[in-house]
Amino acid sequence: MNAFDAIVIGAGTNGLTCAALLAQQGMAVVVVEAHEQIGGLARAHEFHPGYRSAGVLHDTTVVRPWVVDQLSLVHHGLQLRPTKPDVLALGAPGESLLLAGDRLRTAGEIAKVSERDADAFLEYRAYLDRLRPVLSQFFDRQPLDLIDTGMGDLWAMFRQGLSLRKLGKKGALELARLMPMCVGDWLDEWFETDLLKAALALPAVAGTFTGPRSPGTNANLLLHEAAAGTGGVVAGAPALVRALEKSARANGTSIRNGIEVKRLLTDGGCVEGVELVDGEELRAPLVVSSADPKTTLLELLPAGTLPRSTEEALVSWRTRGTTGIVLLALDRKPVFTCAPDKNIAYAQTGGHILDIERAFDAVKYRQVAAKPVLEIEVPTVERPNLAPEGHAVVAVRVHFVPHTHDSGWSEQQRSTLGDQVVAELGQHLENLADTIVAREVMTPADLETSYGTTGGHIHHGEHALDQLLVRPAPGCQRYTTPLEGLFLCGAGSHPGGGLTCAPGGLAATAIART
Amino acid sequence: MVPRFFTAMPIPTPFHTRTQALCTSMFWKDWAGYYAVRSFDTCHEREYYAVRHAVGLFDVSPLFKYDVRGEGAMALLSRVMTRDISKLRPGRVTYCCWCDDDGKVMDDGTVSNLGDDHYRVTAAEPTYGWLCRNARGLPVEITETTDDIGSLALQGPTSRALLSEIVADTKKPIEKLRFFRLLKATIAGHPVIISRTGYTGDLGYEVWVSREHALDVWDQIYAAGRRHGLVPAGLDALDVTRIEAGFIMNGVDYQSAHHCLIESRKCSPFELGLGWTVDLDRPGFNGQAALRRELANGSTWATVGLELDWDEYEAHFTEFGLPPHVSSSAWRTSIPLYAPRRGGRVNGRQIGYATSGAWSPLLKKNLAIATIEPKFQVPGTRIRIEVTVEHERRSVAATVRETPFFNPPRKRA
């Protein structure tokens, strides 16, 4: 007899979302998490005594409103910001542009450098507003099965077609033109200010194995823009995790952390449960994994269990992590030289599209860019309690850092990466080097070890057109797998990585249907 | 040795110096990159009769061979083959085919369990890549041994007596070796593997020997063969015997799913009459889901044996004032088949095609192997087949027959 109806592997945002939704349907659900703390890529950790990080992923604006509603996350303590936080785009030392949460304010900032771009920016935003209702469906609906198309899928495609019609014939054709483009070319069509273009382009290539001159990156930009549904979560990713946990527990989910799954138990094409590293077996007719697809299907299953074609597709699934993390503990609040009087929580470097492209170039050759591009978060602005009184934490996502370093990742290499980031950041922060109490450097290889994602990929698999359309592999597109009872609910499934909670939510819906 | 697909000319088999000396006809063909004798004489007839009445000695070394070793060997082969290889005990050989993910046949061949997690696969086509592609994560070592191992087929009623004279160091006498079993032995002091298998449908054996000992083994067999009516035989004789035995041939009676340019050319094991090699109810193997579906929904084609009506055939020749004529060689062209109309005298719509055939000198029958719509596959069904007589397209009646056409009790005895 099974004590549980479902076992969810991994207590990241997707695992928790899926577990909570399944429990809401009346299932007895247990979540098993390998790490001592829940949260996955959104978990906070103490990287130096008294200093805590705010998770690897930090963009909470993409969390799906319907997940927030269905799981009553607000009731469970989630606070949503009214508008997106400001992001300070940093160019050459002393040069900056504030991308405000409010578009009129942003236009005002842009107008200081280019009147033309200020107008264009409002037009650009309005255009994205028109696309959003069409594109956001990507995040809120079951994926279309492009391999085994049944009548249901044809109907879904037809409906999708109908919503495309809202754009009009010209609009639909324009969308077909935009998706395969490179983000650099499209932004060139809109704007003349290099810093603005670079700032808008970065989210399209962050975490990918592409540069702003790579084809298809414009699709990532459009999807990223379409995903932004809320102003984000107050107190960031860890707060989202806490609310999800509360909701899951309120629905009766039990969460067991610090226990690692060794393998999936199968019998003749059906999954029967999981075997833990300590030898304990948990049995349930339903196992839902939020681990990345390669881990779930290639490592946790005995070789030869999957159909060869699925296995082959998963082996080719690209998971080259390109994001490094540098956490800095500072003995005072950081001061941005170009905005000394502002409390900046988010900033990013990359003054020119070509700076980002050059940073990407290096990773192709398994090297670290001479000038990596940085996404900077100062979590202590909103949550001063992450550091001792008066101190601060600066969390940097570093693009692009290779998972496999040309000459191997050594302590020396890691330290060099840290120095590079500090040097780059030091151009924008006053006396940075003197204020650092401690730092932690994590390469994609370290992320792989700490978070268990193959290749250290923060999205469980690259966001490229092909991997977004068929995610992760034929036969596993709709959260199902070739094994009966085994489902996927992580970022390696539609619609991909980030703090959307959509894969977890949509997986629960898919499971409920079967 | 240069990998053979990179050489412009065929290369010799391990037995080439011997076959070359005997091949007075100079009648060679390229078989999978090797020189292979079509017939040693100008006509293969003597070689054919040797197989049916004494023993024919074939050099079948060009057959692709793969040795699969290691703990995962059984799992790998179970996954690839339509047969459940986990049930193949040491010392046994099985015939089967292997499919792509859509349950379409890629090739057919044998799997031998040599014991100690060591298996040998034979194939008509290069299969190394396919085995490797299926081996992810499995502890196996896959080696292509095609060029390292010489293979001789001794086929015919006196093959057993011949081998029993020269085989030594066996655990049990060769006379006790049952159909589709193998044993390890020595010939001329060299280790060999002997399997009771073949492509003629007769009593027969195949001898597997490493390249360096190949000529010694040939010499010993050849010398002893004098007392047993042994005749070296070529592929033309083999082709007639395999049709009598009802064996299909990759590239002739069906096309490997690997090479088909259009879907409709691919075929399943069921369509090839190899349904009996499919073990469906077991852990997953390549093509399983598709084969289940096909079993439930029915197949598009069936493979059958045909016997052509002699009287009608002869009548066509008589009309031209000619005596009836059949080729002494097997043919392998696509010949249309028709549903019979008006009492079977006239062609209806096309219902399939014959892929190969031969006049059987032993059975005195005009035989063919054909791909046909399943509703015509019942033995005894009369259909019509195209024949060309004096440059004119005609047709004759043909009857669906059980295969093998020729199935002597000695084959299994």
Image (tube, coloured by chain):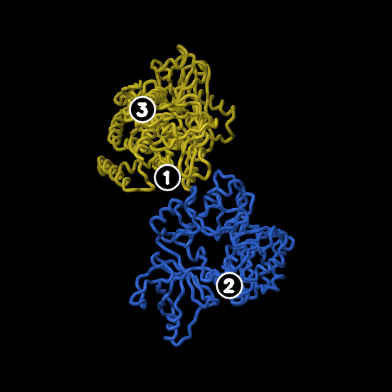
Chain colours: A yellow, B blue
Crowd band around label 3 with a 10 angstrom C-alpha radius: few (<14), some (14–19), many (20+): many
Q: CA distance from mark 3 to mark 2?
A: 77 Å
Q: Is residue A374 visible?
A: no
Q: Amino acid at mark 2?
A: Ala
A434 horizontally vs B176: left or right: left
Q: Amino acid at mark 3?
A: Thr
Residue at which label 1 appears: A475
Between A347 and A136, the one nearer to me in the picture? A136
The residue at the far bottom in this view is B321
| Residue displayed at 43% across by 20% down | A378
What percent of the width, then of the height, locates residue A243? 38, 23
Dots 1 and 2: beta carbons under 8 Å? Answer: no
Crowd band around label 2 with a 10 angstrom C-alpha radius: few (<14), some (14–19), many (20+): many
Q: CA distance from mark 1 to mark 3?
A: 31 Å
User: Which of the labelled discs sits on residue B237, or is there none?
Assistant: 2
What percent of the width, then of the height, locates residue B278? 49, 56
Residue at which label 3 appears: A61
Dots 3 and 2: beta carbons under 8 Å? Answer: no
Between B282 and B357, the one nearer to me in the picture? B282
